[in-house]
Image (cartoon, rainbow, N blue to C red):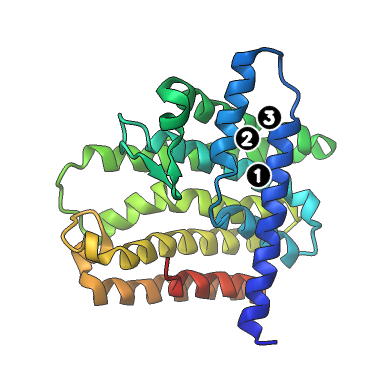
């Protein structure tokens, strides 16, 4: 079998593993009785199980495997990151933010459940992420505080939310390359970085390995956004907040190669042979949709 096909199939199996865990957890979690609570659970499930590449949780699984850590040990943290990511998408789609009607080919959460329950579903997923970490790693309590700190840092004003704030207030500001890079290291890159860093911590990586993997995740997160802009270049070429808008299409492609190469160099400090993680770098560089 062709190596690329084999790696693609291995990644697909991990996506399925994440999907099953997320659906099972949200379906079976013990909740107070009541129709409103049941509706809120449906709202959470609607967005959390609405497809997606599961890039972040799969990344966590693969990093764990690099150190021989079982999937079921990494999965709760991986799902917690995905809950935070899903909450951000629900809130981003709201009329007060991006005002989107469609997400992954289906009506956005607020179009189905109303703005009030969409807001609450996002809130519930965000807070559930930290409960999941606390409960799943109770047998190794020394992990709970650092994992919670890493995820809250990546999700909050020091990461994703801070990046979104910069983006919302930018207006038609013409970003420099350095400013745009900073924005997306926060807005997009932080959750991808923490997917790597948290998994490495759970798997017992050495401090030097965690640091290299943090830089790898940071670089991969930035590369993810640059690749998005390259894919959307027809729409974004005049956008002052896109890499194609400030660098041009060929300049953005060149920057994607540079950032991806830097991420690969950090990965190779930890392992000279990490085919699935190398595949993720390649997948991101070459994705078509």
* CB atoms of marks 3 and 2 within 8 Å: yes
Instruction: Locate the C terminus and report the quarter of the image it occupies.
Output: bottom left
Which numbered marker is on residue 129? 2
- Quadrant position of residue 53: bottom right
Residue located at (60% from left, 35% from top): 45
Horizontal and vertical percent position of residue 38: 64, 21
**Disc 1, disc 3: CB below 8 Å?**
no
Q: Which residue position is annotated with label 1?
A: 79
At 76% from the left edge and 23% from the top edge, which residue is drawn? 30
Whether residue 159 appears in this view of the structure is: no
As measured in the structure, the alpha-carbon distance from the residue carrying label 2 to the one carrying label 1 is: 8 Å
Where is residue 130? Give x, y as percent: 64, 32
Which element carries disc 2, helix, strand or loop?
A: helix
Q: Secondary structure at mark 3?
A: helix
Which quadrant would the N terminus be assigned to in this image? Answer: bottom right
Judging by the rendered image, the residue that carries numbered circle 3 is 131
Residue 210 percent across, percent down from the top left: 63, 58
Asked if the residues shown at circle 2 and circle 1 are in contact, with their CB atoms under 8 angstroms apart, the answer is yes
Mark 2 surroundings: few (<14), some (14-19) or many (≥20) residues within 10 A: many
Residue at the (72%, 37%) spot, across then down:
25
Horizontal and vertical percent position of residue 241? 23, 53
Side (left or right) of 194 relative to 20 = left
Front residue of 197 and 47: 47
**Left or right: 287 as drawn, with respect to 214:** left
């Amino acid at each position: 079998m062709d190596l690329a096909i084999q790696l693609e199939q291995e990644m697909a199996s991990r996506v399925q593993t994440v999907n099953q865990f997320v659906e099972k957890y949200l379906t079976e979690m013990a909740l107070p009785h009541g129709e409103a609570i049941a509706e809120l659970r449906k709202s959470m499930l609607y967005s959390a199980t609405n497809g997606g590449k599961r890039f972040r949780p799969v990344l966590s699984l693969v990093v764990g495997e690099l150190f021989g850590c079982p999937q079921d040990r990494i999965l709760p943290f991986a799902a917690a990151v995905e809950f935070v990511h899903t909450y951000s998408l629900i809130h981003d789609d709201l009329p007060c933010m991006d005002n989107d009607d469609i997400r992954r080919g289906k009506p956005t959460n607020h179009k189905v459940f109303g703005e009030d329950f969409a807001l609450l579903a996002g809130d519930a997923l965000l807070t559930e992420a930290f409960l999941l970490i606390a409960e799943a790693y109770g047998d190794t309590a020394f992990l709970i505080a650092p994992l919670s700190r890493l995820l809250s840092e990546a999700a909050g004003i020091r990461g994703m939310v801070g990046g979104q704030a910069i983006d919302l207030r930018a207006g038609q500001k013409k970003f420099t390359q350095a400013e745009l890079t900073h924005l997306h290291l926060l807005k997009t890159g932080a959750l991808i970085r923490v997917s790597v860093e948290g998994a490495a911590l759970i798997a017992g990586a050495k401090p030097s390995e965690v640091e290299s993997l943090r830089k790898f995740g940071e670089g991969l997160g930035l590369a993810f956004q640059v690749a998005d802009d390259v894919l959307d270049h027809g729409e974004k070429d005049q956008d002052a907040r896109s890499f194609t808008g400030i660098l041009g299409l060929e300049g953005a492609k060149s920057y994607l190669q540079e950032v991806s190469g830097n991420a690969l160099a950090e990965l190779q400090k930890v392992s000279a042979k990490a085919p699935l993680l190398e595949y993720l770098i390649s997948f991101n560089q070459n994705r078509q949709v």
